[in-house]
Amino acid sequence: MSEARKNPFFEPYNTPHDTAPFDRIRLEDYEEAFMEGIRRDNEQIEKTINNPAKPTFDNTIINKDDDTEGYYDLLDRVSTVFFNLLSAETNDEMDALAQKMQPILTQHANDVRLNERLFERIKYVHRHHRKLTPEEKMLLDNCYDGFVRSGALLDKAGKDRLRQLTEEASMLSLQFSQNLLKEQKAFTLHITDEAQLDGLPETAREAAAQEAKQREMEGWVFTLDYPSYSPFMTYSTQRELRRQMYMARNTVCVHDNETNNLEICKRLINLRREIAQLLGYKTYADYVLKHRMAGNVKSVYRLLNDLIDAYKPTAVQEREELKKSLPKALRQENGLEPWDASFYTHKLQLKKYNLDAEMLRPYFRLDKVIDGIFGLANRLYGITFKENNDIPVYHPDVKAYEVFDRDGTYLAVFYADFYPRKGKQGGAWMTQYQGQYIDKKGENVRPHVSVVMNLTKPTADKPALLTLGEVETFLHEFGHSLHGMFANTRFESLSGTNVWWDFVELPSQFMENFSVEKDFLRTFAFHYQTGEPLPDDLIRRIVRSRNFMVATNCLRQVSFGLLDMAYYTQKGEFTADIIPFEKKAWRKAILGKQLPDTCMTVQFSHIMAGGYAAGYYSYKWAEVLDADAFSVFKRHGIFDQKTAQSFRENILSKGGTENPMTLYKRFRGGEPTIDALLKRNGIKRVKS
């Protein structure tokens, strides 16, 4: 008789570096582990609150049975794997289980944060504690404030209401994401007439043919996944088909069906407003910004308005130049439609710089890009990457690497998941399967970080060849991963990317700067067929074109920030219709035509389901920081190891152990200004 199978979450993983055993996990393991994790959590809380000893930092704030075999944080262990895969490799069964478990998990989180006896101990420690290190003090403050911000000071009626609101918001956020994924994956543009491929580069045709073959269809299939959608909108001469693609992408989740997100968005806005007001804040933005570098709503609007003032005149000029470049017939019609923008912007770029993405693609073979980016990390920080096929992965596309520090010691595990597929959300993100911390035995437990992207796939005839934009995306997410990999703090909740959200984008956006640096491109950009390096002339054109449409693109990001703030600065019940409200909210930053049926809000995962509610401005806030920080590297040399070491020690390794501005000033020597960004973008001229 064979031994009964054990749930892999319940025992040591016995894998390299204790990595998640994806090859042994079954769907039924999750629910069992969730429920046992909740039970163990509750048992631990009971031990804490029934401890007869006076509450202390050690027996209340960091009281974990780390030394009891098998009593690792099971709930965190299973939650991390499950919810990461829900974004990267989901299916109908996973979605159904998420719907089942989400209210249970939210109820448990509320049970912990609203436990009066537990909070009394935390409150006592907050007022009476031994001398603490700065990191211990940060953990204590975060713990106390986390309970307060979760309703610990409310009366019973308030706590009951907060439970209702948070549980409903949690379920609606999940439903939003599931609806969006289903809608985005449901659309295809199926072409059987080769003449309708006119204008499309060979890479796009081959990818579409491969997509059709995988679906057992004739001809070519285009989807709303970025590597399929973007080339179609940029190169296709078929204006009607461009219109179909544009409308499909920009009307997801507004149709009269079960995946409509309009009412979900409206309800989420109101739930968050009510949560904030229940906790004593005027608006949800006020609640969020208390723990952000910006500090308050006024500072956010000051940034957004300063950017509009600085960039809008140039954006108007850019749009006029684009209009003048249009064919006469189009100028005499309705003018530039949204589905024309990418197509004619590309033509203008070709005219001005003789440059387009397809010219560069042969030089950006993915395996060489990987070598280049890993090589950059080695040149800056001395770290090395080694693929390890013994580390389990959750999909054949995923690669797993061991990362070693300059002295050869093990630093981290790095997962890279490159290509679009059916059960994967669009976009790109960094996450982790294990955070860094120092356990009670003094061992520095190293992180397992993951980068998930949707890059151009290889075809039967060509390797994966990327656009420059995709190289930038890789660099961006890799910057987040460095933040995770270099984490070196005592407590996991303060390590790596566990920082204020308008600081978290600094390491990622900082890395994007290298994408147009000749000395970096020279290390990996070789033609995939001939081996010839990227020509100097092309590099010059890349650098010259870096600020092509820079003001237009800036206003696009600002418009998203305005929309986000418009929703989350609501003081009264939000009753407006989403679509017209959206168009009014961001009008100040919009120059092009707005169509009555399109809607961004219903697919705006960042602010509806992704944690950026009242925080989308963070991308522009961090852009000011990244331009300022990179100016230091430009002054000393983009590969300067002394500067890189300072960046690592003062920012990348410190996580959330100190105030972000304190960390930044320690690296920079002062507070950032907008000047470096304006100079980089050509908005403000550098004094000679």
Image (spheres, helix red, strand yellow):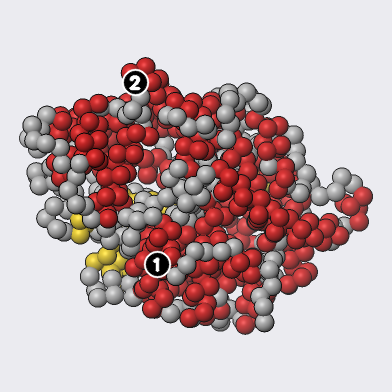
Report whether 636 appears left or right of 593. Answer: left
Residue 225 appears in view: no
Report whether 4 appears left or right of 111. Answer: left
Marks 2 and 1 close (CB-CB < 8 Å): no
Residue 527 pos. (x, y %): 55, 76
- In three-dimensional space, the C-alpha distance between marks 2 and 1, rounded to whole angstroms, equals 42 Å
Q: Residue at x 34, y 49 (%)?
A: 394
Of the numbered discs 2 and 1, the one sitting upstream in the chain is 2
Which element carries disc 1, helix, strand or loop?
helix
Residue 216 pos. (x, y %): 54, 44
Residue 183's place in the image compared with 245, above or below, is: above
Query: In the image, which disc is placed on residue 155?
Result: 2
Residue named by callout 1: 666
Viewport quadrant of the N terminus? top left
Viewport quadrant of the C terminus? bottom right
Residue 316 pos. (x, y %): 78, 56
Q: What residue type is disc 1 on? A: Arg
Instruction: Decide which of 573, 7 is in the foreground and name it.
Output: 573
Q: Residue furthest front?
A: 128
